[in-house]
C-alpha cells in the first residue's frame, strides 16, 4: 500500500515555487503577493488562514492578512475586495469561507476579479474549467491532481467515483478527472446523498474521491482491492482523550480501507496540505498573467 503523503508532495511543489521566486528576485522583480481576508474568529478558519500565510512565507511569497470583525457590514467587505482588485501589487485574493450570515458568500465570490481569483470559485473560472480553457482551478481539486501527478498514479481509462457534489470539491474534481489531462481521462461517476446504489458504484471504482464531510463514511466493504483512495474529508470529532479535545477525521475509515487499497491519503497530512500547494500554484499563475 502506497501512502499518498501530502507533506512530501506539497514540499516538492513548494520547492519548485521557491526556486521560481528566487529567480524573479534575482531578475529584479517582486515576489507574488497573496491577500487573504478573514472575517470573525472561527477556529478552523483561523487555522487554515495561518497555515496559508505560513506557507507563503516559506515559499518566498508576500502575504497580507486582512481581518474584520464578525459583525462587519457586507458593503465594507465588498469595498475592500474592490480596493484589492485595483491594487497592482496584489496578485491573488482569497476570502476565507464560511462567512457570517449577514454576508452573501456568492456576492463576495463574484466580487473578486477573476484574474485574481486564486481560490478558483468565480463563475468565470468555473465556466472556463468546464470548457477546458485555462483557468484557476479550485485549490483542493487542483491539489489532488498535483498529488496524483507527483505519485504517478495512472488514471487514463480508469473508473473514478467522486462522492460529494459541492462546487468547491466534488463537481470540479469530476470535471478534472474526466478531462483530457495527464492525470485525467477517467470515466467518472459523481455520487451524492440521493445516489441509491452508492456501495455498488464504489466497488466498481479504480479511484474513489470521498468529499462528503461524514467521518469514516467509506468503509472497507465499499472499496475493491487495489483501489486508489483520496480522502478529502476533514471533520473535527470530539475526543476527551485528545490533547486539544478533538481529533481530525476523514471521510474514509483509514485503517480498514488502507488494508485493501493500492494507495490512500491520510487525514490529516494528505489532501489538506495539497490544497495549500494548489493555492500557491494558482497565486504564481496569477502573478505571471498579471505581470506579462
Image: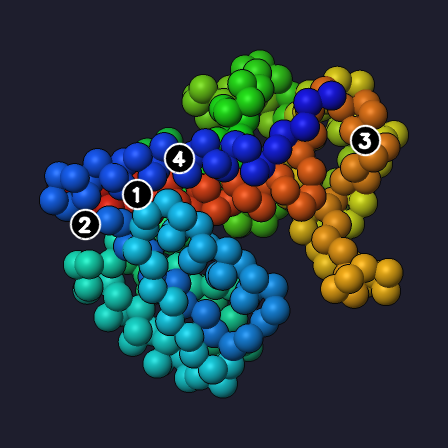
Mark 4 — residue? 15
Residue 283 image offset from top left, x and y in percent: 33, 47
Mark whose residue sits in front, 4 or 1: 4
Residue 184 against residue 237 in the figure, above or below = above
Q: Are marks 3 and 1 in contact (CB under 8 Å)?
A: no
Residue 3 image offset from top left, x and y in percent: 68, 28
Q: CA distance from mark 2 to mark 1?
A: 12 Å
For label 1, the SS is helix
Question: Residue sitting at 86 percent across and 32 percent down?
Answer: 256
Q: CA distance from mark 2 to mark 4?
A: 18 Å
Mark 1 — residue? 284
Location of residue 5 (image quadrant): top right
Question: Residue sitting at 42 percent across and 84 percent down?
Answer: 73
Choose between 1 and 285: the one closer to the eye: 1
Mark 2 — residue? 30
The disc at residue 257 is 3
Q: CA distance from mark 2 to mark 3?
A: 46 Å
Q: Disc 2 or 4, which lies upstream in sequence?
A: 4
Residue 70 shown left or right of residue 193 in the figure: left
Residue 80 in view of the camera = yes
Q: Disc 2 or 3, which lies upstream in sequence?
A: 2
Q: Disc 3 or 1, which lies upstream in sequence?
A: 3
Q: Are marks 2 and 4 in contact (CB under 8 Å)?
A: no
Choose between 232 and 49: the one closer to the eye: 49
Amino acid at each position: 500500500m502506497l501512502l499518498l503523503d501530502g507533506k512530501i508532495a506539497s514540499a516538492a511543489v513548494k520547492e519548485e515555487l521557491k526556486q521560481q521566486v528566487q529567480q524573479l528576485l534575482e531578475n529584479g522583480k517582486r515576489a507574488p503577493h497573496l491577500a487573504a481576508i478573514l472575517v470573525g474568529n472561527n477556529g478552523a478558519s483561523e487555522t487554515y488562514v495561518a497555515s496559508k500565510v505560513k506557507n507563503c512565507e516559506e515559499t518566498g511569497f508576500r502575504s497580507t492578512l486582512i481581518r474584520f470583525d464578525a459583525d462587519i457590514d457586507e458593503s465594507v467587505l465588498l469595498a475592500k475586495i474592490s480596493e484589492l482588485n485595483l491594487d497592482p501589487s496584489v496578485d491573488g485574493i482569497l476570502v476565507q469561507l464560511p462567512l457570517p450570515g449577514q454576508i452573501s458568500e456568492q456576492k463576495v465570490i463574484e466580487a473578486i476579479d477573476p484574474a485574481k481569483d486564486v481560490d478558483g470559485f468565480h463563475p468565470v473560472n468555473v465556466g472556463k474549467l468546464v470548457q477546458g480553457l485555462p483557468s484557476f482551478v479550485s485549490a483542493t481539486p487542483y491539489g489532488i491532481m498535483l498529488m496524483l501527478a507527483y505519485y504517478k498514479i495512472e488514471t487514463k481509462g480508469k473508473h473514478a467515483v467522486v462522492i460529494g457534489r459541492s462546487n468547491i470539491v466534488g463537481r470540479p474534481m469530476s470535471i478534472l478527472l474526466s478531462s483530457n489531462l495527464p492525470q485525467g481521462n477517467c470515466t467518472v461517476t459523481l455520487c451524492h446523498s440521493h445516489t441509491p446504489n452508492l456501495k455498488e458504484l464504489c466497488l466498481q471504482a479504480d479511484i474513489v474521491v470521498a468529499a462528503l464531510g461524514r467521518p469514516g463514511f467509506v468503509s472497507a466493504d465499499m472499496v475493491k482491492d487495489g483501489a486508489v483512495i483520496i480522502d478529502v474529508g476533514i471533520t473535527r470529532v470530539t475526543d476527551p482523550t485528545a490533547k486539544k479535545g478533538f481529533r481530525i477525521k476523514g471521510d474514509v475509515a483509514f485503517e480498514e480501507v488502507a488494508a485493501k487499497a493500492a494507495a490512500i491519503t491520510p487525514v490529516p497530512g494528505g489532501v489538506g496540505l495539497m490544497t495549500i500547494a494548489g493555492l500557491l500554484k494558482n497565486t504564481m499563475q496569477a502573478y505571471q498573467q498579471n505581470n506579462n
